[in-house]
Image: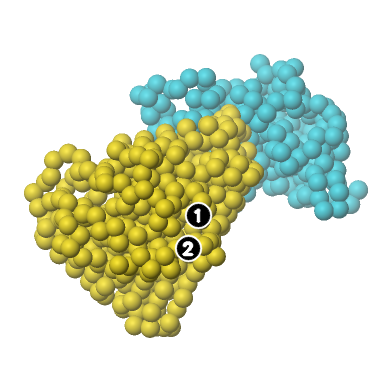
Chain colours: A yellow, B cyan
Amino acid sequence: MTTLTTNYLTPTGREEAWRFTPLKRLGGMHDGSAVVADRHSLSFVGTKAQGVSFELKPASDAPVLSESDDAIVGRIREAGKDVAVLTISANTEVADPIILGRSQGSLESAEFSRVQINVQNHARATIIVENTGDTHLAEDIEISVAAGASLTLVSLQEWSSKTVHAARLHTVVDRDATFKSVVVTIGGSLVRMLPTVEFAGPGASCELFGVYFATSGQFFEHRMFVDHKVANAKSRVNYKGALAGDQAHTVWIGDVFIRAAAEGTDTYELNRNLLLSDGARADSVPNLEIETGEIVGAGHASTTGRFDDEQLFYLMSRGINLADARRLVVRGFFNEIISEIGQDDIQTRLMDRIDDELAKAGA
Amino acid sequence: MSTLEIRGLKVSVDTENGAVEILKGVDLTIKSGETHAIMGPNGSGKSTLAYSIAGHPKYNITGGTVTLDGADVLEMTVDERAKAGLFLAMQYPVEVPGVSVSNFLRTAVTALRGEAPKLRTWVGEVKDAMEALNMDPSFAQRNVNEGFSGGEKKRHEIMQLELLKPKIAILDETDSGLDVDALRIVSEGVNRAKASENIGVLLITHYTRILRYIKPDFVHVFANGKIVEEGGPELADKLEANGYAEYVSA
């Protein structure tokens, strides 16, 4: 029994990793009080291309790819449910995006879900995960991008208003592999994402993009960690957030660790926040820990600001009214990231949702 | 026929040391088809006049009136002023990240015309306006003013003037930072807009060289927050020869 271990790990809110998260709103997923559901809500949408498989495997057949000291991840693993495994076979290039989705959730119980995505050697794919509806979900997603492979992962949190979602999205990027992710969080009551990357071989690279838009009462946390443990890997992080309405709260933590062995590392991380009204709070904390000086570059930037009056004046001086001018500025702000998805229908859908949220917030 | 009438306009800005009066009673009337040059030394308040008419929130109107065909401009929001027929070509056009020129222009023209332009004619309209100003077609896909050179920013302003077709256009130091070729192209754009739409133009400048391309009907010398001398084009020649010294020391 590992009960004692997990009890010991139950966060109190004083820990660095939990100091921003409103623990009371986690539905007991962190302290063992949640009712664990039987459901497996992750489904494969459409038909599987050749070289693509998706199946539920017993936990014993899907050993973990990485350690985690996160309390919720610990409880998911302890629950020992079957693991949803998506595999893209070696040398397979999947032309169309692979769509996974969660829509059949419940607020009565919490789903503890392990997911593994294996992109084997020299395979290429785009995977889109669409999360909608209301649910309580604790998620442990592990991704392996094997040598020479390339994966674009789009993770869309388009939840309804009551969802509580805590997820670790951990990717191991091997030699000469590339990983790009676009994480979008625009729905839910509380969303806590841990997008983490570890480089397992030289020549690996990742681009981590994200946008979040929190309105009244929503709490969205994105706690990044990029582990440069090998030489000559490159990472870029660019997350943008907007907040509107009372008690809207976002947290962005950007931890980058350049270990002694990681010579030739090239890393830059950026977080920008746009406060659209009073009463909202954006926390933004970039952290860079460097154990070797033999690197190409390492930097970070974080800004939090309000609407630029000069931009609004310029647009309005061309006849555009205040509401439309604000909408243009917000769309423009997010466009840089949203356009990285590369799927017009999804981009339009997300921009429309952002317009709706903006209109509802009256910002 | 339109008339922009400025009477006794006083404007102040807030500073750390309290309100400072910049415009000290400006009287000026601009009618359709007329070109007025306002010339003056740096810091005389020329740009304040331009931005106050356009409604920039930084400037506090403390006295006087501005009307366009009798309608009270000072009561209007910034976008209402544009809809009423005012246009300001800015000295330092603002970057709007993530918003393409194409999207920006379509949004503006939709607001001003009250309906979205027909796609087919609109594409042609934009293409013609860009070609006339020697702009590369890729320009439409770039973000508004982001990474534009000084010359590109000014061409973009004049392209808007030609597309948005205002009644009265205020050009704030449109000549600054332009080389001779760009100055000529931009000036031709202004002259085209004048000729086709009978626009009234208020041309604000520090130097006389743009007046070789855009002929003023009236020249006003601006110093210390007000107009200190007025005349015809010959006044510009006098300024060219003597500079602003006599107005500044006065």
- For the residue marked with disc 2, what is the amino acid? Pro
Residue at 45% in and 78% down: A290
Which residue is more in the foreground, A173 or A36? A36
Residue most extreme to the left: A50
- Residue A200's image quarter? bottom left
Answer above or below: position of B239 versus A206: above
- Mark 2 burial class by Cα count in 10 Å: few <14, some 14-19, many 20+: some
Q: Position of residue A1 (x, y in %)?
A: 30, 67
What residue would you read off at disc 1? A23
Q: Position of residue B6 (x, y in %)?
A: 78, 27
Separation of disc 2 and disc 1 at Cα?
8 Å
The quadrant of the picture occupied by the C terminus of chain A is: top right
Tag 1 or tag 2, which sits nearer the N-term? 2
Residue at 52% in and 36% down: A358
Q: Chain of mark 2?
A: A
Residue most extreme to the right: B250
- For the residue marked with disc 1, what is the amino acid? Leu
